[in-house]
Image (cartoon, rainbow, N blue to C red):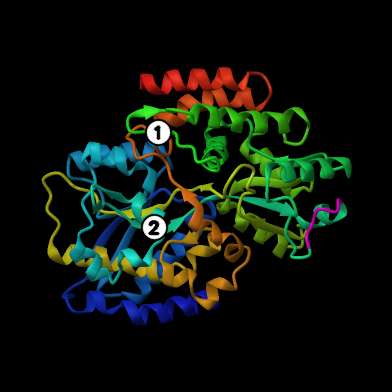
Amino acid sequence: MHFRRLMATALVATGGLWAASAHSEETVLWWDFLGGGDGVRMKQMISDFNAAHAGTIKIDATTLEWGTPFYTKVQTSAAVGEAPDVMTYHASRIPLALTQGVLDEITADDWSAMGLSQTDFAEATWDAVTSDGKQYAVPLDTHPIVLYYNRDLLKKAGVLGDDGKPTGLGSGEEFTAMLQALKDAGVQFPLGSVTASGDFMFRTIYSFMCQQGGELMTGDEFLAGDNADKLTNTLELLQQWTNDGLQSKYTDYPATVALFTSGEAAMMINGVWEVPTMTDLAGQGKLFDWGAVELPVVFDKPCTYADSHSFAIPKNRGKEMSAEKRAAVLEVISWMEKNSQFWATAGHIPAYGPVTESAEYKAMEPNATYSTLTANMIFDPKSPLAGIAGPIFDVMSTYYVPTLNGEMDPAEAVEGIKEELNAL
């Protein structure tokens, strides 16, 4: 109920956007791709929005299949003027969307009407929805990967600090030594990683590349200069962990979560979206003492891969949105942003700065602990080939799985990746 009260309070501050122009109830057609805990929370927010705007605005929401099916549906629907009025969109998919002509610009007047501005968002998050100086979405969150850990096992192995965090987060040598200490203490899997999915491991690998100052794409070239060496360094380290029995081998996503929640893995690299899983199990008395922190610095500097769930307005071909409808859409987005404290219970870091700077958010754990990583984020390269379920993921996944599991030489893998990516 605490979060519901917060949402009601925020409504007082945001409700004026629509009131001045409302004449009759506007129905806003909404599409999202949110399942699991995300879906449960967004459905609650939509319900609360509709209750607060009864008689003026009603969200008519539809949830579609995540990934390629969602984006294909958006593309085909916009082409014939049948797309929704507002939709969720991954920031990483915006470059491709712009080549397809499916996104409407969020103009300066729109930002003003919503009561939002660039200063409300982290620099990397704002940049992720910007192209040629124009914005094409409103970031709702950042959802990075983090390091989950079992305090009980770490304490037993002598690698839990007085601050309740793992001790080996400062360098590759320290982190590897911590993994070894856990193994020596009898932990079956010091680190659980989704090593059977190259798509998922892209997040960890790209983070560690960035920790070396590396980038995947320079201009139109992939792995230019010494970036291939930085990718090789990353794969060598991760392969070493696997070969030394410090990291789970050929583990798919559900198995990785199961290894951690069962106590067989002392730590796990996974998305913040698994926070509700841990919170729910702990609330039922079925989980150990756990925490989550920013990724360890295994190379030169902190850096973590992230994407952003954002709100976008489709460019419906041959269908002009009325001023009243656009005002309603902007009220929907504004309200969701300013009430995103509740969205944070899904583990995500709200993109709207005043929420993360609030006392209520700073009391949320583990969110407040890992929110520091927003200063060290890296998003996908700005390319139509990048983004969730994009061609870059497909190419790299082919090489990552055998390499991470000790069956392919890292340098050989990088050579193949570079050749195939540049052929795209």
On residue 205, the disc is none
Report x, y in % for residue 93.
35, 42
Q: Is residue 192 left or right of residue 41?
A: right
Residue drawn where x is 41% and y is 23% of the image? 421
Q: Is residue 316 above or below residue 401?
A: below
Amino acid at pointer 1: Met
Q: Is residue 46 left or right of residue 367?
A: left
Q: Which residue is mark 1?
A: 217
Residue 259 appears in the rendering: no
Report x, y in % for residue 275.
61, 56
Depth check, front residue: 38 or 158:
158
Report x, y in % for residue 362.
56, 72
Residue 204 drawn in magenta: no
Residue 39 appears in the rendering: yes
Q: Is residue 111 above or below residue 55?
A: above
Report x, y in % for residue 224.
42, 28
In the image, which residues are magenta? 157-161
Depth check, front residue: 235 or 144:
235
Q: Which residue is mark 2?
A: 123
Label 2 residue SS: helix
Amino acid at pointer 2: Glu
Distance from the alpha carbon under mark 1 to that under mark 2: 20 Å
Quarter the N terminus occupies: bottom right
Crowdedness near tag 1: few (<14), some (14–19) or many (≥20) residues, C-alpha within 10 Å: some
Label 1 residue SS: strand
Instruction: Classify residue 422 by image quadrant.
Output: top left
Depth check, front residue: 234 or 273:
234
Q: Is residue 61 above or below residue 202?
A: below
Quarter the C terminus occupies: top left
